[in-house]
Image: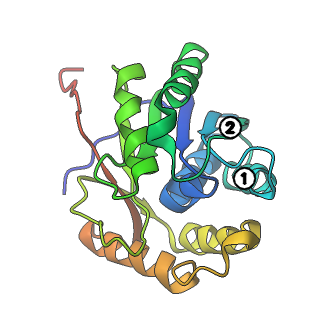
């Protein structure tokens, strides 16, 4: 197992198609980063849920998942499940986000995700963030689309437990879903931990990675 750092991280971009995507896919990584780097800048963009209770949930949740961070969140009103039909609006939002930040790391959905909103957003990211490290997070669901990750962020048991607790606390609108429970979230984290010789982990796909091993 090779461990490579990304250098100093001062700015992060996190994007999701729906409220809760970022927290489910990368909540433990955000907790780990923000706890280690107080004052880190986090620019978050969510394409749907604006003006609803989901937006209120997202504000409270990301504030909890990014303790001590300089958090900026934008939640748009694109219709859930219809992102391909609103491609221009989504692309404009991603371009506007890129224009106001120069991140060291981008957290985004995977291009292999079976949900059309997730994969559509994932395909947009490289058109705006061309020279950035983009980690594609995974979201467990009925589609059975989990693959073989290429990057892992180990999570301490405390962070893994806190992630699950915050997911349950801050997204009451999702508790009725059959896959939205402690066993699903902690179980996947345990499996990904096994794969990287840790107790728990979040896993990501990396489409393109440039190395600088000479410094």
Q: Secondary structure at mark 1?
A: helix
In-front residue for pair 212/107: 107
The quadrant of the image that shows the C terminus is top left
| x and y, in percent, of residue 180 in the image | 57, 77
Q: Is residue 179 above or below residue 6?
A: below
In-front residue for pair 64/91: 91
Q: Is residue 53 above or below residue 71?
A: below
* Residue 192, label in figure: none
Mark 2, residue position: 76
| x and y, in percent, of residue 117 in the image | 46, 48
Front label number (1 vs 2)? 2
Neighbour tally class for label 2: few under 14, some 14-19, many 20 plus, Cα within 10 Å: many
User: Residue at the location (56% across, 27% down)?
Assistant: 89
Q: Secondary structure at mark 2?
A: loop
Q: Is residue 20 above or below residue 67?
A: below
In-front residue for pair 131/126: 126
User: Residue at the location (48% across, 58% down)?
Assistant: 25
Please name the colour scheme applied to the rendered image: rainbow
Q: CA distance from mark 1 to mark 2?
A: 12 Å
The mark that comes first in sequence, 1 or 2, is 1
Residue 47 occupies quadrant: top right
Mark 1, residue position: 58
Considering every residue shown, the one lying at the far front of the view is 85
Q: Is residue 130 above or below residue 2?
A: above
User: Residue at the location (54% across, 60% down)?
Assistant: 28
| x and y, in percent, of residue 150 in the image | 23, 53
The quadrant of the image that shows the N terminus is bottom left
Q: Is residue 107 visible in the rendered structure shown here? A: no
């Amino acid at each position: 197992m090779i461990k490579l750092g990304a250098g100093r991280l001062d700015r992060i971009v996190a994007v999701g198609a729906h409220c809760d995507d970022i927290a489910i896919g990368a909540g433990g990584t955000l907790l780990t980063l923000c706890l280690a780097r107080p004052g880190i800048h986090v620019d978050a963009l969510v394409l749907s849920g604006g003006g609803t209770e989901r937006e209120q949930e997202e504000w409270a949740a990301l504030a909890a998942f990014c303790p001590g961070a300089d958090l900026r969140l934008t939640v748009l009103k694109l219709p859930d499940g219809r992102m391909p039909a609103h491609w221009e609006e989504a692309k404009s939002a991603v371009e506007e986000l890129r224009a106001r930040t120069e991140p060291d790391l981008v957290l985004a959905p995977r291009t292999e995700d079976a949900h059309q909103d997730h994969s559509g957003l994932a395909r947009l990211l490289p058109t705006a963030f061309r020279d950035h490290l983009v980690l594609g997070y995974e979201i467990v669901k009925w589609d059975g689309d989990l693959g073989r990750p290429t990057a892992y962020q180990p999570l301490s048991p405390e962070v893994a437990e806190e992630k699950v607790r915050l997911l349950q606390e801050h997204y009451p609108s999702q508790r009725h879903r059959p896959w939205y429970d402690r066993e699903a979230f902690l179980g996947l984290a345990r499996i990904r931990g096994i794969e990287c010789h840790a107790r728990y982990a979040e896993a990501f796909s990396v489409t393109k990675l440039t190395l600088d091993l000479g410094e």
